[in-house]
Amino acid sequence: MKASRKDMLFFLTLTPFSISLLAILVIAILILISRSFEAFNAFGLSLFTSSIWDPEHSRYGLLAPIVGSITTSILATVTALVFSVPLAILLAEYVHDLVRDILSSIVELMSGVPTIIYAMWASMYLAPILKTYVMDPLSIYLSFIPIFSCKPITAFTIFTAGISIGISITPYVTAMIFESYESIPTTYREACLGIGATRYETVKVLLSLAKPAVIASIILGFARALGETTIAVTTIGNSMYLGSCIFSPGYTVSALIASQFGNAYLYRYAESVLYSSALVVLVVAIILSFIGLSLMSRWRRRVVV
Amino acid sequence: MYKWRKLKDRIFFAVILILSIIAITPVIHLIVVTLANGLSVIIRAGPSFFTSIPPAPTSKDVGGIAPSLVGSLMLTALALPITIVIALFSSIMVNEFPRNPLSIAVDVVAKSLASIPTIAVSMVVYLLVVVPMGTFSTLAGVVALTIVSLPYAYTYFSTYLRSIPETYREAAYSIAMSRWKTVTRVFLPIIRRGVLVTVLMTMARILGETAALLFTVGRYRIGVSTSILGPTDALPLLIFDYILTPYRNFQEIAWGAAALLLIAYLIIFIATKLAVRGVKL
Protein backbone atom coordinates (compact mmCIF):
# COMPACT_ATOMS: atom_id res chain seq x y z
CA MET A 1 0.00 0.00 0.00
CA LYS A 2 1.28 3.41 -0.92
CA ALA A 3 1.69 5.74 2.01
CA SER A 4 -0.86 8.50 1.81
CA ARG A 5 -0.43 11.93 3.37
CA LYS A 6 -2.59 10.92 6.27
CA ASP A 7 -0.42 7.87 6.88
CA MET A 8 2.65 10.05 6.77
CA LEU A 9 1.15 12.30 9.41
CA PHE A 10 0.30 9.28 11.54
CA PHE A 11 3.86 8.05 11.21
CA LEU A 12 5.25 11.44 12.18
CA THR A 13 3.13 11.66 15.31
CA LEU A 14 4.51 8.34 16.43
CA THR A 15 8.16 9.20 15.86
CA PRO A 16 8.79 11.25 19.02
CA PHE A 17 7.88 8.26 21.17
CA SER A 18 10.01 5.80 19.32
CA ILE A 19 12.90 8.22 19.04
CA SER A 20 12.88 8.70 22.80
CA LEU A 21 13.11 4.94 23.15
CA LEU A 22 16.04 4.86 20.74
CA ALA A 23 17.78 7.76 22.41
CA ILE A 24 17.81 6.07 25.79
CA LEU A 25 20.09 3.24 24.75
CA VAL A 26 22.36 5.39 22.63
CA ILE A 27 22.79 7.97 25.38
CA ALA A 28 23.35 5.29 28.00
CA ILE A 29 26.12 3.62 26.04
CA LEU A 30 27.76 6.90 25.06
CA ILE A 31 27.79 8.07 28.66
CA LEU A 32 29.23 4.83 29.93
CA ILE A 33 31.94 4.90 27.27
CA SER A 34 32.88 8.49 27.97
CA ARG A 35 33.04 7.87 31.72
CA SER A 36 35.10 4.74 31.30
CA PHE A 37 37.89 6.50 29.40
CA GLU A 38 39.59 7.76 32.53
CA ALA A 39 39.94 4.27 33.95
CA PHE A 40 40.99 2.72 30.65
CA ASN A 41 43.67 5.37 30.21
CA ALA A 42 44.96 5.06 33.74
CA PHE A 43 45.06 1.29 34.04
CA GLY A 44 44.88 -0.05 30.51
CA LEU A 45 44.41 -3.77 30.22
CA SER A 46 45.55 -4.38 33.78
CA LEU A 47 42.09 -3.25 34.80
CA PHE A 48 40.82 -6.61 33.60
CA THR A 49 43.78 -8.82 34.38
CA SER A 50 44.49 -7.94 38.00
CA SER A 51 42.32 -8.17 41.03
CA ILE A 52 42.63 -5.28 43.46
CA TRP A 53 40.15 -2.91 45.08
CA ASP A 54 42.26 -0.36 46.90
CA PRO A 55 40.68 3.10 46.68
CA GLU A 56 43.12 4.55 49.24
CA HIS A 57 46.01 4.03 46.83
CA SER A 58 43.96 4.33 43.64
CA ARG A 59 44.70 0.82 42.51
CA TYR A 60 41.99 -1.19 40.82
CA GLY A 61 41.60 -4.49 39.01
CA LEU A 62 38.33 -6.08 38.07
CA LEU A 63 39.34 -9.67 37.37
CA ALA A 64 37.77 -11.09 40.53
CA PRO A 65 34.29 -9.62 40.00
CA ILE A 66 34.36 -10.52 36.31
CA VAL A 67 35.29 -14.12 37.07
CA GLY A 68 32.71 -14.06 39.87
CA SER A 69 30.02 -12.87 37.48
CA ILE A 70 30.82 -15.63 35.03
CA THR A 71 30.94 -18.33 37.72
CA THR A 72 27.66 -17.31 39.35
CA SER A 73 25.95 -17.03 35.99
CA ILE A 74 27.13 -20.50 34.96
CA LEU A 75 25.91 -21.93 38.27
CA ALA A 76 22.62 -20.05 37.88
CA THR A 77 22.10 -21.26 34.33
CA VAL A 78 22.83 -24.87 35.27
CA THR A 79 20.43 -24.65 38.22
CA ALA A 80 17.76 -23.09 36.05
CA LEU A 81 18.23 -25.75 33.38
CA VAL A 82 17.99 -28.65 35.83
CA PHE A 83 14.61 -27.36 36.96
CA SER A 84 13.14 -25.79 33.86
CA VAL A 85 13.52 -28.65 31.39
CA PRO A 86 11.55 -31.07 33.61
CA LEU A 87 9.04 -28.36 34.46
CA ALA A 88 8.51 -27.51 30.79
CA ILE A 89 8.14 -31.20 29.87
CA LEU A 90 5.73 -31.80 32.73
CA LEU A 91 3.65 -28.85 31.57
CA ALA A 92 3.68 -29.84 27.93
CA GLU A 93 3.36 -33.60 28.17
CA TYR A 94 1.92 -34.87 31.38
CA VAL A 95 -0.62 -32.45 32.77
CA HIS A 96 -3.82 -31.19 31.20
CA ASP A 97 -6.78 -28.92 31.79
CA LEU A 98 -7.05 -27.61 35.32
CA VAL A 99 -3.74 -28.97 36.64
CA ARG A 100 -1.96 -27.47 33.67
CA ASP A 101 -3.62 -24.11 34.21
CA ILE A 102 -2.63 -24.10 37.86
CA LEU A 103 0.94 -25.19 37.18
CA SER A 104 1.48 -22.68 34.40
CA SER A 105 -0.02 -19.97 36.60
CA ILE A 106 2.49 -20.86 39.31
CA VAL A 107 5.36 -20.58 36.83
CA GLU A 108 3.99 -17.24 35.67
CA LEU A 109 3.61 -16.11 39.27
CA MET A 110 7.22 -17.09 39.99
CA SER A 111 8.54 -15.06 37.09
CA GLY A 112 7.03 -11.83 38.38
CA VAL A 113 7.88 -11.99 42.08
CA PRO A 114 10.06 -8.92 42.76
CA THR A 115 13.72 -9.94 42.90
CA ILE A 116 14.13 -8.15 46.22
CA ILE A 117 11.80 -10.73 47.79
CA TYR A 118 13.81 -13.55 46.23
CA ALA A 119 16.92 -11.86 47.60
CA MET A 120 15.48 -11.60 51.09
CA TRP A 121 14.25 -15.18 51.10
CA ALA A 122 17.53 -16.45 49.71
CA SER A 123 19.65 -14.67 52.29
CA MET A 124 17.47 -15.60 55.27
CA TYR A 125 16.34 -19.14 54.40
CA LEU A 126 18.07 -20.61 51.39
CA ALA A 127 21.62 -19.65 52.35
CA PRO A 128 21.64 -21.40 55.75
CA ILE A 129 19.99 -24.49 54.25
CA LEU A 130 22.55 -24.65 51.46
CA LYS A 131 25.40 -24.24 53.95
CA THR A 132 24.27 -27.03 56.26
CA TYR A 133 23.06 -29.55 53.71
CA VAL A 134 25.10 -28.89 50.60
CA MET A 135 28.21 -26.80 51.10
CA ASP A 136 29.43 -28.30 54.40
CA PRO A 137 29.11 -31.92 53.29
CA LEU A 138 30.61 -31.27 49.86
CA SER A 139 33.57 -29.39 51.31
CA ILE A 140 34.25 -32.28 53.71
CA TYR A 141 33.79 -35.26 51.41
CA LEU A 142 34.74 -33.88 48.03
CA SER A 143 37.44 -31.42 49.02
CA PHE A 144 39.87 -33.02 46.55
CA ILE A 145 37.91 -31.35 43.74
CA PRO A 146 39.28 -27.80 43.43
CA ILE A 147 35.92 -26.03 43.26
CA PHE A 148 34.84 -27.64 46.54
CA SER A 149 38.22 -27.31 48.21
CA CYS A 150 37.55 -24.60 50.78
CA LYS A 151 35.38 -24.73 53.85
CA PRO A 152 32.42 -22.33 53.75
CA ILE A 153 32.92 -19.87 56.60
CA THR A 154 29.63 -18.06 56.15
CA ALA A 155 26.52 -19.04 54.24
CA PHE A 156 27.09 -16.22 51.75
CA THR A 157 29.22 -17.57 48.94
CA ILE A 158 29.54 -17.62 45.17
CA PHE A 159 27.72 -20.95 45.23
CA THR A 160 24.78 -19.51 47.22
CA ALA A 161 24.50 -16.58 44.83
CA GLY A 162 24.57 -18.89 41.81
CA ILE A 163 21.82 -21.14 43.14
CA SER A 164 19.68 -18.20 44.28
CA ILE A 165 19.91 -16.43 40.93
CA GLY A 166 19.25 -19.77 39.25
CA ILE A 167 16.00 -20.18 41.16
CA SER A 168 14.93 -16.68 40.22
CA ILE A 169 15.55 -17.19 36.48
CA THR A 170 14.01 -20.69 36.39
CA PRO A 171 10.50 -19.47 35.44
CA TYR A 172 11.94 -17.31 32.64
CA VAL A 173 13.87 -20.22 31.14
CA THR A 174 10.94 -22.59 31.69
CA ALA A 175 8.59 -20.31 29.76
CA MET A 176 10.99 -20.13 26.81
CA ILE A 177 11.59 -23.89 26.67
CA PHE A 178 7.89 -24.64 27.09
CA GLU A 179 6.93 -22.28 24.31
CA SER A 180 9.44 -23.72 21.85
CA TYR A 181 8.52 -27.28 22.82
CA GLU A 182 4.85 -26.52 22.24
CA SER A 183 5.53 -24.91 18.88
CA ILE A 184 6.99 -28.11 17.40
CA PRO A 185 4.44 -29.25 14.79
CA THR A 186 2.20 -32.13 15.87
CA THR A 187 3.24 -34.23 12.88
CA TYR A 188 6.49 -35.14 14.68
CA ARG A 189 4.60 -36.30 17.71
CA GLU A 190 2.18 -38.27 15.54
CA ALA A 191 5.08 -39.89 13.76
CA CYS A 192 6.58 -40.95 17.09
CA LEU A 193 3.32 -42.35 18.38
CA GLY A 194 2.75 -44.02 15.02
CA ILE A 195 5.82 -46.22 15.39
CA GLY A 196 4.76 -47.11 18.92
CA ALA A 197 7.18 -44.95 20.87
CA THR A 198 6.64 -44.58 24.60
CA ARG A 199 6.16 -41.14 26.01
CA TYR A 200 9.77 -41.01 27.16
CA GLU A 201 10.96 -41.81 23.65
CA THR A 202 8.64 -39.21 22.18
CA VAL A 203 9.96 -36.57 24.57
CA LYS A 204 13.52 -37.56 23.67
CA VAL A 205 12.82 -37.04 19.97
CA LEU A 206 10.94 -33.78 20.43
CA LEU A 207 13.53 -32.42 22.82
CA SER A 208 16.31 -33.18 20.38
CA LEU A 209 14.33 -31.22 17.79
CA ALA A 210 14.07 -28.34 20.22
CA LYS A 211 17.77 -28.44 21.09
CA PRO A 212 18.71 -25.15 19.37
CA ALA A 213 15.84 -23.45 21.17
CA VAL A 214 17.02 -24.86 24.49
CA ILE A 215 20.53 -23.58 23.77
CA ALA A 216 19.09 -20.17 22.94
CA SER A 217 17.17 -20.22 26.22
CA ILE A 218 20.41 -21.07 28.05
CA ILE A 219 22.17 -18.09 26.47
CA LEU A 220 19.29 -15.74 27.29
CA GLY A 221 19.12 -17.08 30.83
CA PHE A 222 22.87 -16.55 31.21
CA ALA A 223 22.52 -12.95 30.01
CA ARG A 224 19.80 -12.34 32.52
CA ALA A 225 21.80 -13.91 35.36
CA LEU A 226 24.75 -11.71 34.44
CA GLY A 227 22.74 -8.55 35.02
CA GLU A 228 21.07 -9.67 38.23
CA THR A 229 22.03 -7.30 41.03
CA THR A 230 19.80 -7.49 44.05
CA ILE A 231 20.08 -11.21 44.67
CA ALA A 232 23.81 -11.22 43.94
CA VAL A 233 24.70 -8.47 46.35
CA THR A 234 22.68 -9.96 49.21
CA THR A 235 23.92 -13.53 48.86
CA ILE A 236 27.46 -13.48 47.51
CA GLY A 237 29.21 -12.16 50.61
CA ASN A 238 30.91 -9.26 48.82
CA SER A 239 34.62 -9.83 49.04
CA MET A 240 37.41 -9.43 46.53
CA TYR A 241 38.27 -13.10 46.17
CA LEU A 242 39.85 -14.76 43.18
CA GLY A 243 40.31 -18.50 43.25
CA SER A 244 38.89 -21.78 42.15
CA CYS A 245 36.71 -22.50 45.16
CA ILE A 246 33.01 -21.66 44.90
CA PHE A 247 32.39 -21.93 48.65
CA SER A 248 34.06 -18.65 49.45
CA PRO A 249 32.51 -15.20 49.38
CA GLY A 250 33.08 -13.24 46.19
CA TYR A 251 31.80 -10.45 44.02
CA THR A 252 29.92 -10.12 40.79
CA VAL A 253 30.32 -6.96 38.74
CA SER A 254 26.80 -5.82 39.61
CA ALA A 255 27.32 -6.61 43.28
CA LEU A 256 30.55 -4.62 43.24
CA ILE A 257 28.77 -1.63 41.71
CA ALA A 258 25.85 -1.88 44.12
CA SER A 259 28.07 -1.94 47.17
CA GLN A 260 30.83 0.48 46.09
CA PHE A 261 29.24 3.09 43.83
CA GLY A 262 27.69 5.00 46.73
CA ASN A 263 31.11 6.04 48.08
CA ALA A 264 32.99 5.98 44.81
CA TYR A 265 32.90 9.75 44.33
CA LEU A 266 35.27 10.08 47.29
CA TYR A 267 38.14 8.39 45.48
CA ARG A 268 40.03 9.13 42.33
CA TYR A 269 39.26 6.67 39.49
CA ALA A 270 36.78 4.63 41.56
CA GLU A 271 33.72 5.95 39.75
CA SER A 272 35.31 5.56 36.36
CA VAL A 273 36.37 2.00 37.15
CA LEU A 274 32.82 1.14 38.11
CA TYR A 275 31.45 2.75 34.95
CA SER A 276 33.81 0.69 32.85
CA SER A 277 32.78 -2.49 34.65
CA ALA A 278 29.12 -1.62 33.99
CA LEU A 279 29.96 -1.03 30.34
CA VAL A 280 31.55 -4.47 30.07
CA VAL A 281 28.52 -6.22 31.58
CA LEU A 282 26.13 -4.19 29.47
CA VAL A 283 27.88 -4.93 26.20
CA VAL A 284 28.25 -8.63 27.00
CA ALA A 285 24.59 -8.89 28.04
CA ILE A 286 23.40 -7.17 24.86
CA ILE A 287 25.57 -9.35 22.61
CA LEU A 288 24.47 -12.54 24.35
CA SER A 289 20.81 -11.67 24.15
CA PHE A 290 21.15 -10.92 20.46
CA ILE A 291 22.80 -14.26 19.84
CA GLY A 292 20.07 -15.94 21.88
CA LEU A 293 17.21 -14.15 20.17
CA SER A 294 18.53 -14.75 16.66
CA LEU A 295 19.19 -18.44 17.38
CA MET A 296 15.64 -18.69 18.64
CA SER A 297 14.04 -17.02 15.65
CA ARG A 298 16.18 -18.98 13.19
CA TRP A 299 15.12 -22.22 14.86
CA ARG A 300 11.50 -21.12 14.76
CA ARG A 301 11.65 -20.42 11.03
CA ARG A 302 13.30 -23.77 10.33
CA VAL A 303 11.23 -26.11 12.48
CA VAL A 304 7.90 -24.50 13.06
CA VAL A 305 6.96 -23.51 9.54
CA MET B 1 12.30 -55.55 25.76
CA TYR B 2 8.93 -53.85 25.94
CA LYS B 3 8.96 -54.17 29.74
CA TRP B 4 12.29 -52.38 29.94
CA ARG B 5 11.04 -49.55 27.76
CA LYS B 6 7.92 -49.27 29.87
CA LEU B 7 10.06 -49.13 33.02
CA LYS B 8 12.28 -46.44 31.54
CA ASP B 9 9.15 -44.48 30.76
CA ARG B 10 8.03 -44.72 34.39
CA ILE B 11 11.43 -43.74 35.77
CA PHE B 12 11.54 -40.77 33.43
CA PHE B 13 8.16 -39.56 34.62
CA ALA B 14 9.21 -39.94 38.26
CA VAL B 15 12.36 -37.89 37.69
CA ILE B 16 10.44 -35.17 35.85
CA LEU B 17 7.83 -35.01 38.58
CA ILE B 18 10.36 -34.86 41.44
CA LEU B 19 12.47 -32.14 39.79
CA SER B 20 9.35 -30.13 38.97
CA ILE B 21 8.16 -30.32 42.55
CA ILE B 22 11.58 -29.16 43.76
CA ALA B 23 11.42 -26.35 41.20
CA ILE B 24 8.18 -24.88 42.50
CA THR B 25 8.90 -25.47 46.20
CA PRO B 26 10.98 -22.29 46.60
CA VAL B 27 8.25 -19.95 45.45
CA ILE B 28 5.65 -21.56 47.68
CA HIS B 29 7.99 -21.49 50.67
CA LEU B 30 8.90 -17.91 49.85
CA ILE B 31 5.29 -16.76 49.76
CA VAL B 32 4.44 -18.58 52.98
CA VAL B 33 7.39 -17.30 55.03
CA THR B 34 7.19 -13.76 53.69
CA LEU B 35 3.51 -13.50 54.50
CA ALA B 36 3.93 -15.21 57.89
CA ASN B 37 6.88 -13.09 59.00
CA GLY B 38 5.62 -9.88 57.48
CA LEU B 39 2.00 -10.04 58.55
CA SER B 40 2.94 -10.79 62.15
CA VAL B 41 5.09 -7.64 62.16
CA ILE B 42 2.35 -5.56 60.55
CA ILE B 43 -0.28 -6.83 62.99
CA ARG B 44 1.99 -6.16 65.98
CA ALA B 45 2.74 -2.64 64.78
CA GLY B 46 -0.87 -1.90 63.96
CA PRO B 47 -1.93 0.95 61.70
CA SER B 48 1.14 2.95 62.70
CA PHE B 49 3.13 0.62 60.43
CA PHE B 50 1.70 2.58 57.51
CA THR B 51 1.88 6.02 59.04
CA SER B 52 5.14 6.32 60.98
CA ILE B 53 8.78 6.52 59.97
CA PRO B 54 11.36 3.72 60.42
CA PRO B 55 12.75 3.38 63.96
CA ALA B 56 16.24 4.05 65.25
CA PRO B 57 18.42 0.94 64.89
CA THR B 58 18.29 -0.12 68.52
CA SER B 59 14.91 1.20 69.64
CA LYS B 60 12.26 -1.18 70.92
CA ASP B 61 9.30 -0.10 68.79
CA VAL B 62 8.73 -1.46 65.31
CA GLY B 63 8.11 1.86 63.62
CA GLY B 64 6.64 2.17 60.17
CA ILE B 65 7.29 2.46 56.47
CA ALA B 66 5.33 5.58 55.57
CA PRO B 67 8.16 7.35 53.65
CA SER B 68 8.87 4.30 51.48
CA LEU B 69 5.21 3.53 50.94
CA VAL B 70 4.39 7.05 49.77
CA GLY B 71 7.58 7.12 47.70
CA SER B 72 6.74 3.85 45.98
CA LEU B 73 3.20 4.98 45.22
CA MET B 74 4.42 8.27 43.79
CA LEU B 75 7.15 6.67 41.70
CA THR B 76 4.69 4.16 40.26
CA ALA B 77 1.99 6.75 39.62
CA LEU B 78 4.46 8.88 37.65
CA ALA B 79 6.51 6.24 35.86
CA LEU B 80 3.65 3.97 34.79
CA PRO B 81 1.75 6.38 32.48
CA ILE B 82 4.95 7.61 30.82
CA THR B 83 6.11 4.05 30.20
CA ILE B 84 2.75 2.91 28.86
CA VAL B 85 2.39 5.84 26.47
CA ILE B 86 5.88 5.56 24.99
CA ALA B 87 5.69 1.77 24.77
CA LEU B 88 2.22 1.72 23.23
CA PHE B 89 2.97 4.30 20.55
CA SER B 90 6.32 2.77 19.71
CA SER B 91 4.82 -0.68 19.36
CA ILE B 92 1.99 0.67 17.18
CA MET B 93 4.56 2.30 14.94
CA VAL B 94 6.62 -0.87 14.60
CA ASN B 95 3.47 -2.86 13.90
CA GLU B 96 2.14 -0.40 11.31
CA PHE B 97 5.36 0.49 9.51
CA PRO B 98 7.49 -2.63 10.01
CA ARG B 99 9.88 -2.00 7.14
CA ASN B 100 10.74 1.57 8.05
CA PRO B 101 14.37 1.89 9.24
CA LEU B 102 13.22 3.72 12.36
CA SER B 103 10.87 0.88 13.24
CA ILE B 104 13.57 -1.72 12.76
CA ALA B 105 15.89 0.29 14.98
CA VAL B 106 13.22 0.65 17.66
CA ASP B 107 12.55 -3.07 17.69
CA VAL B 108 16.25 -3.88 18.00
CA VAL B 109 16.84 -1.28 20.69
CA ALA B 110 13.84 -2.38 22.73
CA LYS B 111 15.19 -5.90 22.72
CA SER B 112 18.64 -4.77 23.83
CA LEU B 113 17.24 -2.49 26.51
CA ALA B 114 15.51 -5.53 27.96
CA SER B 115 18.83 -7.21 28.55
CA ILE B 116 20.84 -4.39 30.10
CA PRO B 117 21.46 -4.72 33.83
CA THR B 118 19.18 -2.36 35.74
CA ILE B 119 22.09 -1.25 37.90
CA ALA B 120 23.71 0.25 34.80
CA VAL B 121 20.50 2.22 34.20
CA SER B 122 20.77 3.51 37.73
CA MET B 123 24.35 4.71 37.13
CA VAL B 124 23.45 6.45 33.88
CA VAL B 125 20.47 8.22 35.41
CA TYR B 126 22.67 9.22 38.33
CA LEU B 127 24.95 11.03 35.88
CA LEU B 128 22.18 12.48 33.74
CA VAL B 129 19.71 13.59 36.40
CA VAL B 130 21.12 13.39 39.91
CA VAL B 131 24.47 15.07 39.28
CA PRO B 132 23.08 18.08 37.33
CA MET B 133 20.31 18.58 39.87
CA GLY B 134 22.69 18.23 42.76
CA THR B 135 20.31 16.02 44.68
CA PHE B 136 18.66 12.63 44.58
CA SER B 137 15.05 12.96 43.52
CA THR B 138 11.76 11.32 42.72
CA LEU B 139 12.26 12.58 39.18
CA ALA B 140 15.49 10.58 38.82
CA GLY B 141 13.70 7.52 40.12
CA VAL B 142 10.89 7.99 37.62
CA VAL B 143 13.36 8.28 34.75
CA ALA B 144 15.21 5.14 35.85
CA LEU B 145 12.01 3.14 36.33
CA THR B 146 10.69 4.24 32.96
CA ILE B 147 13.85 3.09 31.20
CA VAL B 148 13.77 -0.24 33.01
CA SER B 149 10.12 -1.00 32.32
CA LEU B 150 9.88 0.39 28.77
CA PRO B 151 11.20 -2.67 26.92
CA TYR B 152 9.03 -4.85 29.11
CA ALA B 153 5.82 -3.00 28.24
CA TYR B 154 6.92 -2.71 24.61
CA THR B 155 7.37 -6.48 24.29
CA TYR B 156 3.92 -7.13 25.74
CA PHE B 157 2.23 -4.60 23.47
CA SER B 158 3.93 -5.77 20.31
CA THR B 159 3.13 -9.41 21.08
CA TYR B 160 -0.55 -8.53 21.45
CA LEU B 161 -0.57 -6.35 18.34
CA ARG B 162 1.10 -9.04 16.28
CA SER B 163 -1.45 -11.63 17.39
CA ILE B 164 -4.25 -9.78 15.58
CA PRO B 165 -4.99 -11.66 12.33
CA GLU B 166 -4.34 -9.72 9.11
CA THR B 167 -7.95 -10.27 8.06
CA TYR B 168 -9.08 -7.55 10.47
CA ARG B 169 -6.79 -5.06 8.77
CA GLU B 170 -8.06 -6.08 5.35
CA ALA B 171 -11.65 -5.78 6.48
CA ALA B 172 -11.04 -2.32 7.92
CA TYR B 173 -9.29 -1.10 4.78
CA SER B 174 -12.00 -2.53 2.56
CA ILE B 175 -14.54 -0.21 4.16
CA ALA B 176 -12.17 2.71 3.56
CA MET B 177 -10.97 3.17 7.11
CA SER B 178 -7.70 5.04 7.39
CA ARG B 179 -4.69 3.50 9.07
CA TRP B 180 -5.17 5.70 12.10
CA LYS B 181 -8.82 4.70 12.43
CA THR B 182 -7.95 1.03 11.94
CA VAL B 183 -5.58 1.20 14.88
CA THR B 184 -7.83 3.17 17.21
CA ARG B 185 -11.21 1.72 16.27
CA VAL B 186 -10.33 -1.87 15.44
CA PHE B 187 -6.96 -2.96 16.82
CA LEU B 188 -6.97 -1.30 20.22
CA PRO B 189 -10.49 -2.53 21.05
CA ILE B 190 -9.45 -6.05 20.04
CA ILE B 191 -6.45 -6.05 22.37
CA ARG B 192 -8.04 -4.02 25.17
CA ARG B 193 -7.62 -6.81 27.69
CA GLY B 194 -4.05 -7.20 26.53
CA VAL B 195 -3.50 -3.51 27.19
CA LEU B 196 -4.93 -3.94 30.67
CA VAL B 197 -2.65 -6.93 31.34
CA THR B 198 0.35 -4.95 30.11
CA VAL B 199 -0.47 -2.02 32.35
CA LEU B 200 -0.84 -4.31 35.35
CA MET B 201 2.33 -6.32 34.70
CA THR B 202 4.33 -3.16 34.07
CA MET B 203 3.00 -1.78 37.32
CA ALA B 204 4.16 -4.90 39.15
CA ARG B 205 7.55 -4.56 37.52
CA ILE B 206 7.88 -0.92 38.54
CA LEU B 207 6.76 -1.59 42.11
CA GLY B 208 9.31 -4.35 42.60
CA GLU B 209 12.34 -2.83 40.90
CA THR B 210 15.27 -2.31 43.23
CA ALA B 211 18.58 -1.90 41.44
CA ALA B 212 17.41 0.98 39.25
CA LEU B 213 16.63 2.98 42.38
CA LEU B 214 19.92 2.46 44.19
CA PHE B 215 21.61 5.67 43.04
CA THR B 216 18.60 7.70 41.94
CA VAL B 217 15.92 8.34 44.57
CA GLY B 218 18.12 8.78 47.62
CA ARG B 219 17.03 7.28 50.90
CA TYR B 220 14.84 9.88 52.55
CA ARG B 221 13.38 8.17 55.60
CA ILE B 222 13.12 10.83 58.25
CA GLY B 223 9.75 11.99 57.01
CA VAL B 224 7.24 11.59 54.24
CA SER B 225 8.30 13.43 51.10
CA THR B 226 5.91 14.30 48.32
CA SER B 227 8.31 16.51 46.42
CA ILE B 228 9.12 15.50 42.87
CA LEU B 229 12.44 17.29 42.85
CA GLY B 230 13.50 16.16 46.30
CA PRO B 231 14.80 12.81 47.55
CA THR B 232 12.38 10.06 48.45
CA ASP B 233 12.40 6.35 49.22
CA ALA B 234 10.82 3.16 47.90
CA LEU B 235 9.73 -0.13 49.42
CA PRO B 236 12.25 -2.36 47.61
CA LEU B 237 15.06 0.02 48.54
CA LEU B 238 14.04 -0.05 52.20
CA ILE B 239 13.97 -3.85 52.18
CA PHE B 240 17.33 -3.95 50.40
CA ASP B 241 18.99 -1.70 52.97
CA TYR B 242 17.44 -3.29 56.01
CA ILE B 243 18.03 -6.97 55.30
CA LEU B 244 21.74 -6.28 55.15
CA THR B 245 21.78 -4.77 58.64
CA PRO B 246 22.23 -6.81 61.83
CA TYR B 247 19.48 -4.93 63.72
CA ARG B 248 16.48 -6.99 64.62
CA ASN B 249 13.89 -4.24 64.32
CA PHE B 250 15.24 -3.24 60.90
CA GLN B 251 14.83 -6.80 59.71
CA GLU B 252 11.28 -6.84 61.06
CA ILE B 253 10.47 -3.69 59.13
CA ALA B 254 11.96 -5.31 56.04
CA TRP B 255 9.73 -8.37 56.44
CA GLY B 256 6.68 -6.18 56.88
CA ALA B 257 7.54 -4.19 53.78
CA ALA B 258 8.26 -7.38 51.83
CA ALA B 259 4.89 -8.85 52.81
CA LEU B 260 3.18 -5.67 51.67
CA LEU B 261 5.04 -5.72 48.36
CA LEU B 262 4.22 -9.40 47.86
CA ILE B 263 0.53 -8.85 48.62
CA ALA B 264 0.46 -5.98 46.12
CA TYR B 265 2.09 -8.24 43.54
CA LEU B 266 -0.33 -11.10 44.25
CA ILE B 267 -3.31 -8.79 43.85
CA ILE B 268 -1.96 -7.49 40.55
CA PHE B 269 -1.27 -11.02 39.40
CA ILE B 270 -4.78 -12.22 40.21
CA ALA B 271 -6.19 -9.14 38.47
CA THR B 272 -4.28 -10.00 35.29
CA LYS B 273 -5.56 -13.58 35.48
CA LEU B 274 -9.12 -12.27 35.72
CA ALA B 275 -8.48 -9.87 32.86
CA VAL B 276 -7.28 -12.57 30.47
CA ARG B 277 -10.05 -14.95 31.34
CA GLY B 278 -12.43 -15.29 28.44
CA VAL B 279 -10.21 -13.67 25.84
CA LYS B 280 -11.26 -15.27 22.62
CA LEU B 281 -10.22 -14.01 19.25
Image: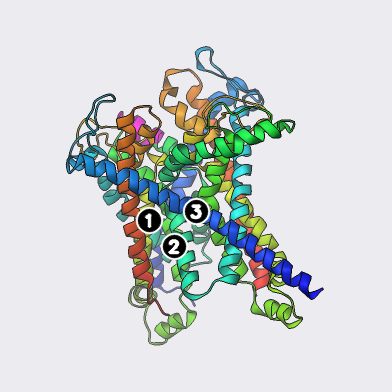
Q: In this figure, which residue is indicated by the disc labeled 3?
A: B25
CA gap, disc 2 and disc 1:
9 Å
Q: Is residue A180 visible?
A: yes
Please state the extent of the stretch shown in magenta in the rendering.
B126-135
- In the image, residue A87 sits, relative to residue A128, either above or below, namely below
Local SS, label 3: helix
- C-beta proximity under 8 Å, tags 2 and 1: yes
Label 3 environment density (alpha carbons within 10 Å; few <14, some 14–19, many ≥20): few
- Of residues A60 and B33, the one nearer the viewer is B33
Picture coordinates of residue B158 (x, y %)? Answer: 46, 65
- Which residue is depicted at the point 69% across and 29% down? A149
Label 2 environment density (alpha carbons within 10 Å; few <14, some 14–19, many ≥20): many
In the displayed orientation, state which residue is furthest to the right: B1
Q: In this figure, which residue is indicated by the disc labeled 2?
A: B156
Picture coordinates of residue A157 (x, y %)? Answer: 56, 32
Q: Chain of mark 2?
A: B
Q: Amino acid at mark 1?
A: Thr
Q: In this figure, which residue is indicated by the disc labeled 1?
A: B202
B129 is within the stretch colored magenta: yes
Q: Is residue B241 left or right of residue A260?
A: left
Reading the chain from its start, which is encountered first: label 3 or label 1? 3
- Which residue is depicted at the point 32% across and 64% down? B271
Picture coordinates of residue A161 (x, y %)? Answer: 54, 38
What number is the disc on residue A3?
none
